Structure formats: C-alpha cells, structure tokens
Image (cartoon, rainbow, N blue to C red):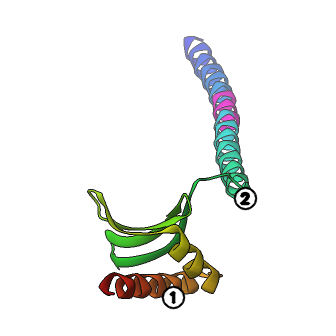
Amino acid sequence: MTQISTSQTITSNTVSSSSELNLYSQMGTSIGSALIGVIFMILLLGWIVKRLGQNKKRNAYIHVKATHCISPKERIILVEVDKQLLVVGITSHHMTLLHTIDEQRAEKLLSQSIPVAKSMDNNLFKQVLQSALKSKKE
C-alpha cells in the first residue's frame, strides 16, 4: 500500500512540475517577444527620426562645397563661410587652413558651375583649386 501512494505522489508531483514549467515557458516566451518588440520599436523610431532630421533645411553658416579624399584619413575640403571660400586640410588629428579665397573671387567661382553630384563636387574642387593656385602665382 505504501508503494501505490508513493507512485501516486511522484506522478502528481511530475504533473504539477510539468504544468509549472509550461507556465514558466509561456511567460518567458511572452516576455521575450515583448522585449524584442520594444527593441525593434526603439530602432525603428531612431531610424525614422534620423531620416526626417536630414530632410530639414538648416540655416547653417558653414557650407561644405566640395571634398577631395587624399587617403582614407586625409582629405581637403572647400568650405564657404561668410561669403568666403576656405580650403581646409583635414587629417585624423587636426585641421589646417590651406588657403582663403576672397568674396569676389568666391562669387565668380561658385557662379561658374553648380555641383549636382559628388563627381561634380570633385570637378568644382579641382577648378577652384587650380584657379586659386593660378591667381596666387600671379
């Protein structure tokens, strides 16, 4: 008689523990899916904010007109600040002003060609740099 009651107790413990495990696994699955959903929503909202933030027109006083990469960490940029064009050399450690183009010359150079694509930016940069070097020699 003791053997029957012991086996019934073991079976009832097994059934109750398997139902508890089933309950815990369901809770874990629902919590995990909720966590994944929240993380996905955060990433989605971040992407949306980033995309909408780029489309806003900003009243910036500094405009990068052209860029020319010399190496992966070195480049030369043409920046318009206060109706002047600045030729700036950029490395991984510092920035150096290479040349300043005055207001009249800058207006003349910028009115010659308006860049449409990045390839046009490089052509504009090349033109501006060559004309600046020619005017400096004269």
- Residue 3 falls in image quadrant: top right
Q: Secondary structure at mark 2?
A: helix
Asked if residue 1 is positioned above or below residue 36 in the image, the reply reads above
Q: Is residue 24 above or below residue 90?
A: above
Looking at the picture, tell me which residue is in the foreground, 114 or 25.
Answer: 114
Closer mark to the observer between disc 1 and disc 2: 1
Label at residue 137: none
Give coordinates of residue 61: x percent, y percent. Answer: 58, 53
Residue 86: x and y in percent read 43, 66
Q: Furthest-top residue in view?
A: 2
Residue denoted by label 2: 55
Give me the residue at 70% from left, 48% from top. 49
Tell me, yes or no, if residue 106 can be seen here: yes
Disc 1 residue type? Asn
Which residue sits at x=46%, y=74%?
A: 67
Farthest front residue in view: 138
Most common secondary structure along the magenta stretch:
helix
| Boundaries of the magenta span | 22-30
In this rendering, the answer to whether 33 lies above or below 123 is above
- Quarter of image, res 130: bottom left
Mark positioned earlier in the residue sequence (1 or 2): 2
C-alpha distance separating marks 1 and 2:
26 Å
Residue wearing tag 1: 123
